[in-house]
């Protein structure tokens, strides 16, 4: 029987495709202050480092100086829209089946995302994904955000001692895993820009249907994680 693992998942671009929702929320916020809309490609390219960084990058793209008061106001506006909007967000194919199989195999599952906790809980509940995850670490759970290793370490500490694997889709996730010294599994269908083979992943997968089998085969080759906290 395969070892029980602590499996920590990124959210946006890994389990859900929220880029269209983020794009719509960003345009709503910036158009409300008289600025032009962004292209989908522009917004998608800025996803991954949390709402504050996203809004700051969008402000720079519009030629706005990073005024702390304006930045804080736009972040609040963005979150208020994004926390309640799900119509443009979808769950990637195979996610439900994969999570059910992994949970049934005894693995403990967690979320480690740069999305704030409020929108994270809201979207997980909306799509009935919350039942799979005993631990959720959001972008505002700690003072640090990914790619700092602290959020991933915190998620693993809350899950308890076991071998660990971090599953994500982006350069930020790869850097987080590397900094945390946790093996990385890369989902290729997300928001990555760099070639998949350059991100140091132990396994690379294109569809979530493959993940339970990959975890089963990878598990014996993983080392037991050191305690983080």
Image (spheres, grey):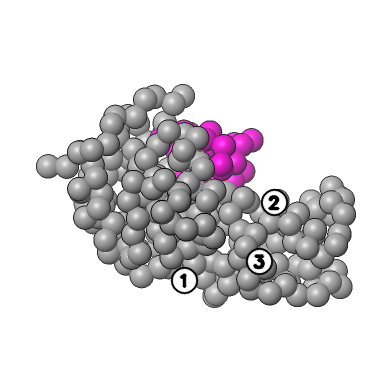
Q: Residue at x 58, y 72 (%)?
A: 20
Residue 228 is situated, as x and y percent measured from the top left of the image, at: 44, 26
Q: Which residue is mark 1?
A: 90
Residue 128 is situated, as x and y percent measured from the top left of the image, at: 40, 62
Q: Is residue 151 magenta?
A: yes
Q: In front here: 29 or 130?
A: 29
Q: Which residue is mark 3?
A: 43
Tag 3 secondary structure: helix
Tag 2 secondary structure: helix
Q: Alpha carbon of mark 2 to alpha carbon of mark 1: how far?
A: 23 Å
Q: In front here: 1 or 202?
A: 202
Q: Residue at x 68, y 56 (%)?
A: 54
Quadrant where the image shows the N terminus: top left
Q: Which residue is mark 2?
A: 53
Give the left or right position of residue 99, taking residue 76 as reference: left
Q: Is residue 100 visible?
A: no
Residue 5, disc: none
Q: Alpha carbon of mark 1 to alpha carbon of mark 3: how far?
A: 17 Å
Please report whichever mark, 2 or 1, sits nearer to the chain's N-terminal start: 2
Q: Residue at x 40, y 68 (%)?
A: 92
Please report whichever mark, 1 or 3, sits nearer to the chain's N-terminal start: 3
Please report whichever mark, 2 or 3, sits nearer to the chain's N-terminal start: 3
Q: In front here: 32 or 12?
A: 12
Residue 158 is situated, as x and y percent measured from the top left of the image, at: 41, 34
Q: Magenta part of the protein: which range? A: 136-156
Q: Is residue 94 magenta?
A: no
Give the left or right position of residue 197, taking residue 47 as reference: left
Q: Is residue 224 visible?
A: yes
């Amino acid at each position: 029987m395969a070892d029980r693992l602590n499996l920590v998942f990124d959210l946006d671009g890994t389990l859900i495709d929220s880029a269209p929702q983020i794009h719509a929320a960003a345009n709503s916020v910036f158009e409300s202050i008289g600025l032009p809309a962004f292209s989908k490609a522009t917004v998608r390219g800025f996803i991954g480092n949390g709402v504050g960084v996203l809004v700051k990058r969008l402000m720079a793209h519009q030629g706005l100086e990073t005024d702390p008061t304006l930045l804080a106001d736009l972040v609040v506006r963005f979150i208020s829209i994004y926390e309640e909007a799900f119509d443009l967000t979808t769950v990637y194919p195979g996610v439900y089946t994969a999570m059910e199989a992994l949970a049934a195999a005894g693995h403990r599952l967690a979320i480690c995302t740069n999305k704030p906790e409020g929108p994270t809980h809201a979207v997980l509940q909306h799509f009935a994904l919350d039942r799979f995850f005993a631990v959720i670490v959001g972008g505002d759970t700690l003072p640090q955000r990914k790619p700092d290793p602290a959020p991933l370490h915190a998620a693993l500490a809350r899950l308890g001692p076991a071998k660990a694997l971090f599953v994500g889709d982006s350069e930020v996730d790869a850097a987080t895993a590397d900094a945390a010294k946790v093996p990385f599994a890369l989902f290729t269908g997300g928001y990555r820009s760099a070639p998949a083979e350059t991100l140091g992943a132990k396994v690379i997968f294109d569809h979530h249907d493959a993940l339970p089998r990959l975890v089963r085969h990878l598990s014996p080759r993983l080392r037991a994680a050191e305690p983080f906290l």
